[in-house]
Amino acid sequence: MTLKLGIWAMPVDERGLDYVREAERLGVDVAWVPEAWSYDAMTLIGAAATVTDRIRLGSAIAQLGTRTPALLAMTSLTLQKLSGGRFLLGLGTSGPQVIEGFHGVRFDRPVTRTRETIDIIRMATRGERLEYDGEIYQLPLPDGEGKAIRTRAETVHVPIYLASLGPRNLRLTGAAADGWIGNSFFCETADVFLDDIRAGAESAGRSLDDIDLTVSVGVEITDDVEEAARRHAAGFAFTFGAMGSEKSNFYNNAFARQGWGDDVAAVQRLWLDGDRAGAAARVPAAIGLGQNLIGPPEEISRRLRQYRDCGINSLRIGPIGDSFEEHIDGLGRLMDLIDAVNDETILE
């Protein structure tokens, strides 16, 4: 197995587009465009598609419930056409704070919604008439004037990637998706995620090898490992304290299943009590190390081998450094390290 590299990108202006172009030049495999509560991912992917030729372009993630399944299919077919087949549809449920608070859409039955959305997208991109009788979606609406319609767009396969953390959604990823947009992942506890994806794949007559497994990491090439680890760890205070409600935080649940439950609960309590500095200081430095590639080149190479050996196909990274020049230099250095690790794999 060889490792590939993806980047987080925001091609909302010329500098953002330049970053994607430079990533393509350096051999990066995918540019993933996020969608939280700022810019929508699909428009930015369309912009990036017009200035690139090879790099794949994915949404990470389009939030379920904010678009109908049919619109997601239409948008996907549009971006596949515009990009010459380079589009990856990354989907995820997000959480109630964003879906209900920002979009005003009820956050309910997320796994069922995901399953039905995938079903309808697959039907549409195969050119089938949209007749569907689900728990959430009924097409056409019963007792209405609608008719079952098939798209007039040119149909083509659209790879679907799921951002999943909980066991049921992980099993759905294995059963129905082309790839996994992983997060909160430690190589040492990889089976917490991969066992469920594998079980889902096998339930559908597939194997784990049929799923493109990609996980998110930060990167800092440095000799001061302790300081960098502490700084990166502190950033997780927002994740544990604010990326969800006190009752529903999918990231916290994922960390807890990997043995970090007491730490996560302590950080969340400090954050909710208003002690942001205390929350940041309470995050163990080991989380900063385990969630990122931190250290001198030889240490980063060792960690790259860890990801490869536990079955991960691709890493997703944010910009390295502060300036645009540092972003490109860091990306080039990391690509060199990945190429060297991949050369070792080939020789083996």
Image (cartoon, grey):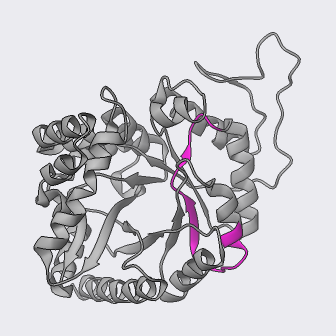
User: From this viewpoint, is residue 203 visible?
Assistant: no
Observer-nearest of 45 and 199: 45
Q: Position of residue 43 (x, y in %)?
A: 70, 59
Q: Quadrant of residue 328?
A: bottom left
Look at the image and say whether residue 319 sits in the magenta stretch: no
Observer-nearest of 314 and 248: 248
Magenta span of residues = 47-66
Q: Residue at x 58, y 52 (%)?
A: 38
Q: Residue at x 71, y 56 (%)?
A: 156
* Left-right relation of 59 to 258: right
* Left-right relation of 122 to 154: left
Please, is residue 116 above or below residue 310 in the view?
above
Q: Position of residue 270 (x, y in %)?
A: 19, 39
Residue furthest to the top: 143
Q: Quadrant of residue 222?
A: bottom left
* Left-right relation of 329 to 24: left
* Quadrant (top left/top right/bottom left/bottom right) for the C terminus: bottom left
Q: Position of residue 287 (x, y in %)?
A: 17, 57
Q: Position of residue 290 (x, y in %)?
A: 18, 61
* Quadrant (top left/top right/bottom left/bottom right) for the N terminus: bottom left
Q: Quadrant of residue 150?
A: top right
Please, is residue 114 above or below residue 283 in the view?
above
Look at the image and say whether residue 48 sits in the magenta stretch: yes
Q: Residue at x 73, y 42 (%)?
A: 71
